[in-house]
Amino acid sequence: MAQQGVLLDQDQFCCSVCLDLLKEPVTIPCGHSYCRSCIEGCWDQDVLKGVYSCPQCRETFTPRPNLRKNNMLAELVEKLKKTGLQAVPPPALCYAGPGDVACDVCTGTRKQKALMSCLVCLASYCETHLQSHYESPAFKKHKLVKATAQLQEKICSHHDKLLEVYCRTDQQCICYLCTMDEHKGHDTVSAAAERTEKQVRPEQLSSAQAAVEDSDQIFTELIRSIERRRSEVKELIRAQEKAQVSQAEGLLEQLEQEIAELRKRSTELQQLSHTEDHIHFLQSYQSLSSISVSSDLPSIVVRPLQFFGDVSKTVSELREKLEDFLKGEWTKISTTGVLKIITTSTLDH
């Protein structure tokens, strides 16, 4: 039974810094006990600050307290060693490796890996040294985050206070003391409020992306429609040009045939004028003079410049109407707020 009691109470006789049985235990003013060498090692690092704190509850002391051996605790530890406590294996330790955040409370050459960092204490803690933050009411309002090595980036370089305010005027994170001096009178809000305002909800991002894709598709179809109309107008112009040329070529060929015929009759009449046979002259002249020039030739109307000018004018008028229509629709789109959402999303990211 005694052995079971020792097993249940063994944590009470371990130093929370070295995690081993207390060696020359001393008790500091807040009531917590440590190995003399462990607490002295911690406080030796705070000599320049002039303020000394408890590694567990973070209570501060000024000046540095004098340490006295806790004789009762020392005797209990010695008795526990004799009853077999030393045979109980210590808990498995998870030491910090490369890239890990080391516990700020652990001492010695090898420190345990920190699990969480406290934004109030500005320190990182391993699983053992983190327990006080979960158990002690003094740490109830402390802000714990995943262990990070960039704690100093969250501290104001001017006042050594936590950066928890956002200055919209200067667009930077500041501490609450900054609002009283160099940022006095500026537009400031809490960092949480600024993030809430700037953070776009996933559904808004999806809606904006869908609007962009729909707009792209509509404009693509519009461009394709205009390209089709352009091809049709081009084909119409080429067809008109071909018809005009074909008509002109047909009339030219007919005129050339009639000219050739007239030249032939002219030659025959000239030859006939030299004959001395009056009867032959009169009979031939009658047949030659009866052939007349065709009078049903279609008139050639050449107006390509006028036709093509009309086409160009019509296309220009279509462009103007399209531009006016797009301007009107653009006004409708901008007033719906869709563009406002897209613009806001773009600026925030």
Image (cartoon, grey):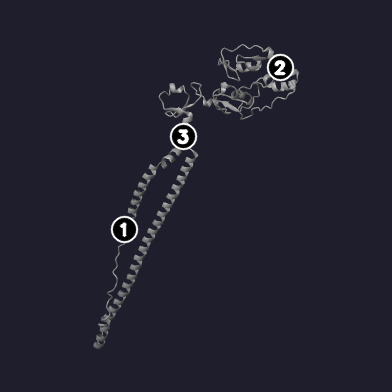
Tag 2, which secondary structure? helix
Going from N to C along the chain, the mark reached first, 3 or 1, is: 3
Q: Which of 101 and 177 is in front in this view?
A: 177
Which x, y percent locates residue 168?
Answer: 43, 29
The amino acid sitting under disc 1 is: Asp
Q: Which residue is drawn at 37% across and 45% down?
A: 332
Q: Which of 140 and 335 is in front in this view?
A: 140
Q: Residue at x 35, y 47 (%)?
A: 328
Going from N to C along the chain, the mark reached first, 2 or 3, is: 2
Label 2 crowding class (10 Å Cα cut-off): few <14, some 14-19, many 20+?
A: many
Q: Which residue is drawn at 72% across and 21% down?
A: 5
Label 3 crowding class (10 Å Cα cut-off): few <14, some 14-19, many 20+?
A: few
Tally the marks. 3
Which x, y percent locates residue 300?
Answer: 29, 67
Q: Which of 112 and 316 is in front in this view?
A: 112
Label 1 crowding class (10 Å Cα cut-off): few <14, some 14-19, many 20+?
A: few
Residue 77: give its label: 2
3D distance between C-alphas at marks 3 and 1: 55 Å
- In this rendering, position of residue 179 left or right of residue 240: right
The residue that disc 1 covers is 310
The amino acid sitting under disc 3 is: Lys
Comparing labels 3 and 1, the label whose residue is closer to the camera: 3
Which x, y percent locates residue 237?
Answer: 36, 60
Comparing labels 2 and 1, the label whose residue is closer to the camera: 2
Q: Quadrant of the N terminus?
A: top right
Q: Which residue is drawn at 70% across and 23% down?
A: 8
The residue that disc 3 covers is 198
Tag 3, which secondary structure? helix
Picture layout, residue 274 above or below residue 64: below
